[in-house]
Amino acid sequence: MSGGTPVGGGYMRQRHSQGYASSGDDLEDDACSRQQPFSPSSPRIRTWLEIMESVLWIASAVFIVYFGDRRSNLMHVLWHDKRIRRMPLYLGMAGVGLNVVIFFYSRMLSWSIRRFDDKWDMPSISALPYVTLLGVVSFCLLSFAMWPIWSFLTLPLLFTLLMACIVVFPHLMIGTFTPQNDVFRTD
């Protein structure tokens, strides 16, 4: 960084120095005063293709849950069929439940963040490897538990249910974020 004064072994920017405004050293300083593309005043318009993909994932998941194994629905099969391996099923469901709890907890903690540039300090970033590992282990356990009923179709079945949850989850907002985009920063 140039244009600064030495402070504790490093340089500190001086915004009010004469050469700072004309040197073009930091072009990102103007970024906070521009309109953000994700602000509520300019909502993102979804294309018909995105809407059709979402509807297809949700319709496929409803079909899977409703028809199950063609004789009874998925919930009845999961709880009453003797072919399902119970311990991996319960451990996989506990892993999925724990993932949902971690998502909601990190979402609640992200409400306390006031500035957009502090997004990398969120606790959800530090929990991301654990959530990913827990999700993969849960997927494997559920696949192992349901394999005797659907065999190789268990993998697309679980993936379809996962994608339907990913499509529906953003619409289950507990609250809304307060936009900070229209306020000019003075720091």
Image (spheres, rainbow, N blue to C red):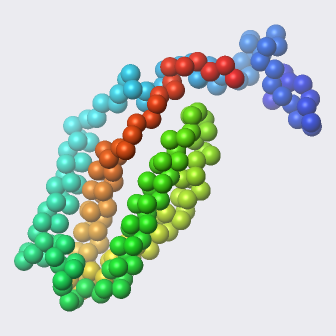
Q: Is residue 86 left or right of residue 112?
A: left
x and y, in percent, of residue 124 in the image: 54, 53
Which of the 4 image quadrants contains residue 11? Answer: top right
Judge whether 180 appears above or below 103 on screen: above
Q: Is residue 10 left or right of residue 161?
A: right
Judge whether 100 appears above or below 39 on screen: below
| The C terminus - image quarter | top right
x and y, in percent, of residue 86 in the image: 31, 85
x and y, in percent, of residue 178 in the image: 46, 31
x and y, in percent, of residue 153 in the image: 23, 74
Relative to the observer, which residue lies in front, 71 or 179? 179
Q: Residue at x 90, y 25 (%)?
A: 5
Residue 144 seen in the figure? no
Q: Is residue 140 left or right of residue 149?
A: right
Q: Residue at x 22, y 78 (%)?
A: 78
Q: Residue at x 35, y 27 (%)?
A: 43
Q: Is residue 146 left or right of residue 32?
A: left
Residue 93 seen in the figure? yes
Relative to the observer, which residue lies in front, 158 or 102? 102
Relative to the observer, which residue lies in front, 155 or 172? 172
